[in-house]
Image (cartoon, rainbow, N blue to C red):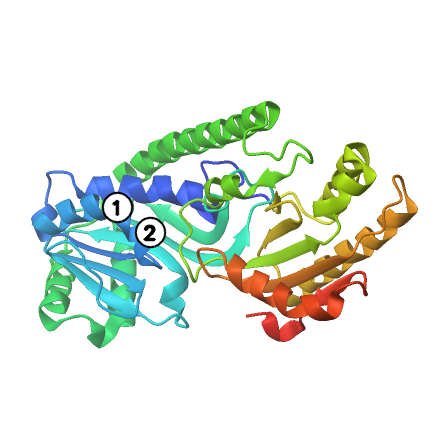
Amino acid sequence: MVAEKGASARAGLLTKRALVIASHAVEHAALSDVGLEQAVVIAMFQRLPYFEREREVYARIAQRAKATVVGMVDRSRPDLPPGVTPVLLSADEQLASEWSVAVLSPTFGASVVAQDLAEVEDQVTSLEAARLFDGRWGFRRDESYAEIVRLRDALGDRLPPPVRAAIDSTLRSVVLPAATEVEVRTEAALRHLAGRLVEQRSGYATLRQEVAQEKGYGRDPWTGLHTLGSLPGWLGISAPGTLALGLTLLRVTELPWLAARLGSQVSMHTEINIADALHAEIRTCDQAVRVSKDEFLLVQPAVSGAEANNTARTVLDRLEELGETYPFVRLSGTAAVTVSADRPLPLNRLRSQLREREPELAGSLSGTLAGPNEWFR
């Protein structure tokens, strides 16, 4: 899936990387010294960890703006800077999956509005940066006016009366015609600059990944698979409840004793074969990780429970087939599968599910899938 149709696109399929740059442009435009006292700012942040990265910016905005409103999914009122009005969202409402920021004053408007698609682009150097949204951004007052009205109405009586009154006051103050030609030209220049930034950041991320792979950083020296320590950098600052991941924890019971019984060459070749079996079943946006001597993890963004389950079954079938190829070692694989938006990743829960299966597996079945579809969430 190709995002942005050129990194300078202002609407359509956009990556989070592009939205971050556009949002920062809108937020810093709000911080200019012109007319902020009459401005209102409304932003949807999905989850608190995403707001924390912008806390200082919104603290500065709230010191001067007429009203500053931030919406996010949370169970209790979060600790936000003075002057920032929090609005709690339920996880199942449409605003919970929205990334937006709208700024409006009597003479200026800018906005970013995007819906989380719960998908990622094909080439992933950072999972969080590769998240995909359907949205648009721009520096047009009429668009910002419409977004402020929409968000005000969607938040309804969750807005305190003084904050709603401030928003209505700013909306009534917009009476002068928009400087349409200036807005369009300014927006075109910003699109060009934003596009260059997206391209540079993407290029830098790709180069960093290539260097790390060449040097073996974050890689298991035997199999070339990613290590568990490299996973946080790939995930990025990923908040719980946003992007669901298919997780398959695979345990190969023979690996701990293989070298002692059959020699290091057989052990090394078998581990490489296992890595090849994992790579054969993953997409370019997936991650195959060596967790320990006998454990491997597949991380698959934006898959259904059935898709994750099918991948696990195919991997187990491939492990059985390894007994027919050099070095002809028959392996007993067990897999625990779940689809979860939890952060951190629920590895301990997957291990518990594997342990529940171990007594009946001991010395018997090969290629067993631990657990039915009720594990999927």
Pick the residue in front: 155 or 185: 155
x, y (%) of residue 62?
Answer: 13, 51
| Secondary element type, mark 1 | loop
Q: Which mark is on residue 102?
A: none
207 over 146 or under it: above or below: above
Q: Assess disc 1: are there few (<14), some (14-19) or many (≥20) residues with their C-alpha within 10 Å of its C-alpha.
A: few
Q: Which residue is mark 1?
A: 54
x, y (%) of residue 353?
Answer: 60, 67
x, y (%) of residue 175?
Answer: 14, 55
x, y (%) of residue 135?
Answer: 43, 53
Q: Residue at x 29, y 70 (%)?
A: 75
Q: Residue at x 51, y 43 (%)?
A: 231
Pick the residue in front: 298 or 90: 298
Q: Residue at x 63, y 51 (%)?
A: 298
Q: Is residue 279 left or right of residue 146?
A: right
Q: Is residue 330 left or right of residue 198?
A: right
Q: Assess disc 2: are there few (<14), some (14-19) or many (≥20) residues with their C-alpha within 10 Å of its C-alpha.
A: some
In the rendered structure, which amino acid carries the disc numbered 2? Tyr
| Secondary element type, mark 2 | helix
Q: Is residue 208 left or right of residue 296?
A: left
- The answer to whether any part of residue 304 appears in the image is no
Determine whether label 2 and label 1 are within 8 Å by CB. yes
Q: Which residue is mark 2?
A: 50
